[in-house]
Image: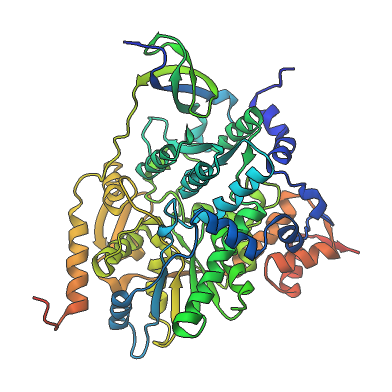
């Protein structure tokens, strides 16, 4: 029987294809009109921390070094008010087999695929996750296909994404490269249907739980080394999985007092699905184009219920501009002797700024680094920006206009983490839950869910719902 | 140019024409097709520009227009960006000022 392969027909089979390809029936966790039991889903479909440590340990993932950035701390103290300037640490996740923390997510996903008897894995990602899945698939003897959004309509590719394609191929994966557009998802569904492979989604419970080991390790490493938990952990935030998993791991270690800060590169005004904007971006991940939509509507991913729920765990959400992240990438190389990929240093730029608000006996942690190489490095990324008509200059990064220029701070004191009103995000989240589901009324159980998932109060949630004319029923 | 069967090649295909694309796209994206590039072993002798079938590294059969044989990566570290030099010099000056590092 020949199935219809048009865009509409394949998208209409989405639910059925997904169920086959993830092996999770999400409907068993759902109740009310919008609610689902997040913790039960994580418990019943994920792995315990101990199991994950074994799974990841088997493939050399995790237990990455925790490095103190003494020179960057000293620099921050020179710029900070008297007595301020927290100690800055970095978790060197680039030491994982595939060169980023994504190995933790991939280790679980690929292990799970093998356990369920799938012959291969597919992931839709232009980021480090592709290489992570390919690396794990190589270790476990599974086939691997990675689908990337890589080129604009003139055939010009983002150097950072091309490098990631190379890395996937190096691990024996097939790479399918596409031009710009959300219909990447259509190609993804077609491939899942054609191959019967496992959907190694970034957003399954096992993928997200894979990052819990990172948070747990952080707590253990700090207790061993300085005898206490860190005060602030900064997570680069895109799809929300990094932040969610890290925060959950810290909680599992009993490090409940740690403040979690989400950090994204500001790409304001650049449309994620725009062909023309594609190569005007100097960051392909860790930016607001993912960070904001995924925080305010997590269930937009390639699984029905995303296990990444960043609003649940985020205490603050701050932005930095592209020029600031590039500057800090160079600072990390020049002052700490660590050459790492720019996107992972988003949280470093934030930590450098926030450290200056904190006392000297406090600790702030950058919880990841990523590998660097051709295409994926300050030099080619700035060079590419110039080729695409972006002006690169020194000045006040505050004045950066995304898509027009990149302003490298003329002095490190100009690097500033800019706060996003988190209540604004909570409000958008609640609105999205209502409008995306076309609801006029919700149940009390739904209200409880919104309060938990949005990490907010009943009063706040009710006020938003009232504004939307939504009734609460028993 | 003729390419022999079994050569490692790169093909191109149109996944969706502008008319077949999703409806909720920005105007610039709506105007252009969704294109795809895949690599694999050429199934039959062919010339560049012809419709061909390939077998990818995972064993899938994919059809498309033959672009090139022996595709290789040419992404690099880009052209020299003089601004980068200044960052290190400035940082070292601020951090180590007054200390004997000359």
Identity of the residue drawn at 57% across and 23% down: B19
For residue A277, side relative to residue A466 (left or right): left
Q: Is residue A337 above or below residue A46?
A: below
Q: Is residue B1 above or below residue A377?
A: above
Tell me where residue A139 appears, x and y as whole percent. Answer: 51, 45
Q: Quadrant of the C terminus of chain A?
A: bottom right
Q: Is residue A449 above or below residue B101?
A: above
Q: Residue A122's quadrant in the figure?
A: top right
For residue A184, side relative to residue A428 (left or right): left
Q: Residue A471's quadrant in the figure?
A: bottom right
Tell me where residue A2 appears, x and y as whole percent. Answer: 71, 18
Farthest residue to the bottom: give it.
A83
Identity of the residue drawn at 31% across and 71% down: A414
- Can residue A87 be seen in the rendering of this structure? yes
Tell me where residue A352 appears, x and y as whole percent. Answer: 37, 73
For residue A298, side relative to residue A335 (left or right): right
- Can residue B32 be seen in the rendering of this structure? no
**In this orientation, which residue lies closer to the viewer: A314 or A369?**
A369
């Amino acid at each position: 029987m020949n199935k219809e392969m048009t865009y509409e027909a394949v998208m209409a089979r989405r639910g059925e294809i997904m169920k086959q390809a993830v092996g999770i029936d999400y409907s068993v966790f759902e109740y009310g009109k919008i609610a689902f039991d997040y913790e039960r889903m994580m418990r019943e479909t994920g792995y315990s921390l101990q199991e994950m440590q074994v799974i990841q340990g088997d493939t050399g993932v995790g237990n990455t070094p925790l490095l103190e950035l003494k020179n960057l701390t000293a620099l921050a103290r020179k710029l900070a008010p008297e007595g301020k300037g927290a100690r800055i640490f970095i978790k060197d996740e680039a030491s994982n087999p595939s060169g980023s923390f994504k190995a933790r997510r991939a280790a679980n996903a690929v292990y799970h695929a093998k356990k369920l008897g799938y012959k291969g894995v597919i992931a839709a990602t232009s980021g480090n996750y592709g290489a992570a899945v390919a690396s794990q698939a190589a270790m476990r003897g599974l086939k691997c296909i990675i689908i990337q959004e890589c080129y604009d309509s003139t055939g010009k590719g983002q150097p950072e994404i091309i490098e990631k394609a190379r890395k996937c191929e190096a691990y024996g994966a097939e790479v399918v490269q596409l031009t710009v557009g959300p219909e990447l998802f259509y190609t993804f569904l077609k491939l899942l249907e054609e191959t019967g492979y496992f959907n190694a989604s970034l957003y399954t419970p096992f993928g997200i739980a894979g990052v819990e080991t990172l948070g747990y390790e952080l707590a253990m490493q700090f207790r061993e080394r300085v005898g206490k938990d860190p005060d602030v952990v900064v997570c680069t935030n895109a799809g929300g999985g990094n932040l969610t998993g890290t925060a959950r791991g810290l909680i599992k270690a009993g490090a409940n007092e740690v403040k979690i800060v989400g950090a994204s590169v500001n790409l304001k005004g650049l449309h994620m699905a725009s062909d023309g904007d594609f190569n005007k971006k100097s960051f392909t991940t860790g930016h607001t184009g993912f960070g904001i939509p995924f925080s305010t509507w997590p269930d937009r991913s390639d699984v029905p219920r995303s296990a990444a729920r960043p609003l649940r765990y985020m205490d603050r959400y701050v932005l930095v501009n592209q020029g600031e992240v590039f500057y800090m990438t160079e600072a990390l190389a020049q002052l700490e002797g660590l050459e790492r990929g720019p996107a992972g240093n988003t949280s470093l730029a934030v930590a450098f700024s926030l450290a200056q608000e904190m006392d000297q006996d406090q600790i702030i942690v950058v919880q990841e680094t990523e590998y660097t190489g051709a295409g994926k490095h300050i030099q080619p990324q700035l060079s590419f920006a110039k080729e695409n008509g972006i002006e690169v200059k020194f000045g006040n990064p505050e004045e950066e206009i995304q898509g027009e220029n990149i302003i490298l701070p003329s002095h490190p004191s100009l690097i500033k983490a800019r706060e996003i009103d988190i209540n604004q995000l909570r409000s958008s989240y609640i609105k999205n839950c209502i409008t995306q589901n076309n609801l006029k009324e919700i149940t009390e159980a739904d209200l409880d869910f919104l309060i938990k998932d949005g990490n907010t109060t009943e009063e706040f949630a009710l006020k938003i719902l009232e504004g939307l004319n939504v009734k609460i029923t028993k | 140019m003729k390419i022999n069967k079994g050569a490692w090649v790169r093909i191109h295909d149109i996944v969706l024409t502008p008319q077949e694309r999703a409806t909720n796209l920005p105007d610039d994206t709506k105007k252009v097709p969704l294109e795809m590039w895949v690599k694999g072993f050429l199934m039959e002798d062919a010339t560049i520009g012809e419709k061909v079938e390939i077998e990818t590294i995972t064993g899938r059969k994919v059809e498309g227009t033959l672009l090139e044989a022996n595709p290789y990566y040419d992404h690099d570290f880009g052209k020299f960006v003089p601004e980068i030099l200044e960052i290190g010099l400035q940082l070292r000056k601020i951090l180590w000022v007054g200390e004997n590092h000359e």
